[in-house]
Image: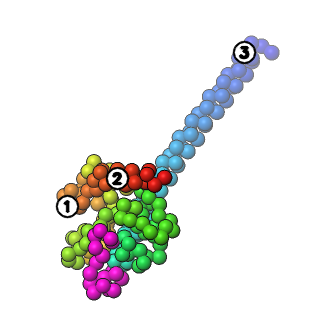
């Protein structure tokens, strides 16, 4: 075999090696794109589940209001008041809230709920009564905002930047830290 034939054979091997590396790189990029799409769709699904939980809580509030002559549950005991009107205690938790999982616990306090609540004074459409916890640094259950339930029964997504302009309550860090310290002392 002449030197030219040997050189051509080696170049074929080099070409196959480079093509193999390119295929591996392309497959890696495709897998990364698929994982990013899956991650985004999971976050979007959790936002939708959270929104559905708020609507279930509104239905429970409506039943409570019907039983108590138009009065909504008091702010300090709203979760306990609505617990008997819901089929699932997970309605009180946001799927993005990693610290709280009620499952089938029979008793719980207001600190074990993912949402804030304000007893409505009127049933105007712009009166916010319940929603995701958002802290003063604009971080909360969700990264870029939170779901809010209004007194007329509609719920919608509100971006973190618009939270203060819509006069929605911020959760304080002190409340969250005291909840964590209670959990540590119980263990």
Relative image position of residue 175 (x, y in whole percent): 31, 54
10 Å crowding of disc 2: few (<14), some (14-19), many (20+): few
Comes first in the chain, label 2 or label 1: 1
Q: Position of residue 137 (x, y in %)?
A: 27, 48
> Cβ–Cβ below 8 Å for labels 2 and 1?
no
Residue 162 percent location from the top left of the image: 23, 56
Q: Nearer the viewer, mark 1 or mark 3?
A: 1
| Farthest-out residue, front | 185
Write down the region rendered in magenta.
62-78
Q: CA distance from mark 1 to mark 3?
A: 80 Å
Q: Quadrant of residue 49?
A: bottom left
Residue sitting farthest toward the top: 3
Q: Is residue 125 above or below residue 1?
A: below
Residue closer to the observer: 151 or 31: 151
The earlier-in-sequence mark between 1 and 3 is 3
- The mark closer to the camera, 3 or 2, is 2
Return the residue at label 1. 167
Q: Left or right: where does residue 3 sit relative to residue 128?
A: right
Nearer-the-camera pick, 61 or 147: 61
Q: Would you name the residue on which mark 3 appears?
A: 4
Q: Disc 3 and disc 2: Cα gap in Å?
A: 79 Å
């Amino acid at each position: 075999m002449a030197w030219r034939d040997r050189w051509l054979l080696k170049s074929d091997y080099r070409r196959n090696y480079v093509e193999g590396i390119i295929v591996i790189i392309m497959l890696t990029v495709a897998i990364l794109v698929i994982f990013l799409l899956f991650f985004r769709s999971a976050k979007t699904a959790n936002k939708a589940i959270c929104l559905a939980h708020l609507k279930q809580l509104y239905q429970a509030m409506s039943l409570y209001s019907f039983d108590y002559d138009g009065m909504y549950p008091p702010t300090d005991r709203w979760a306990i008041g609505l617990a008997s009107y819901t089929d699932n205690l997970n309605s009180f938790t946001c799927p993005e809230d990693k610290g709280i999982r009620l499952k089938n616990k029979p008793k719980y306090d207001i600190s074990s709920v993912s949402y804030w609540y304000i007893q409505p004074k009127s049933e105007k459409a712009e009166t916010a009564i319940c929603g995701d916890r958002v802290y003063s640094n604009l971080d909360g259950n969700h990264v870029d905002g939170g779901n809010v339930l209004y007194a007329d029964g509609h719920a919608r997504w509100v971006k973190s930047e618009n939270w203060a302009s819509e006069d929605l309550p911020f959760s304080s860090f002190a409340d969250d830290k005291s909840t964590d310290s209670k959990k540590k002392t119980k263990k």
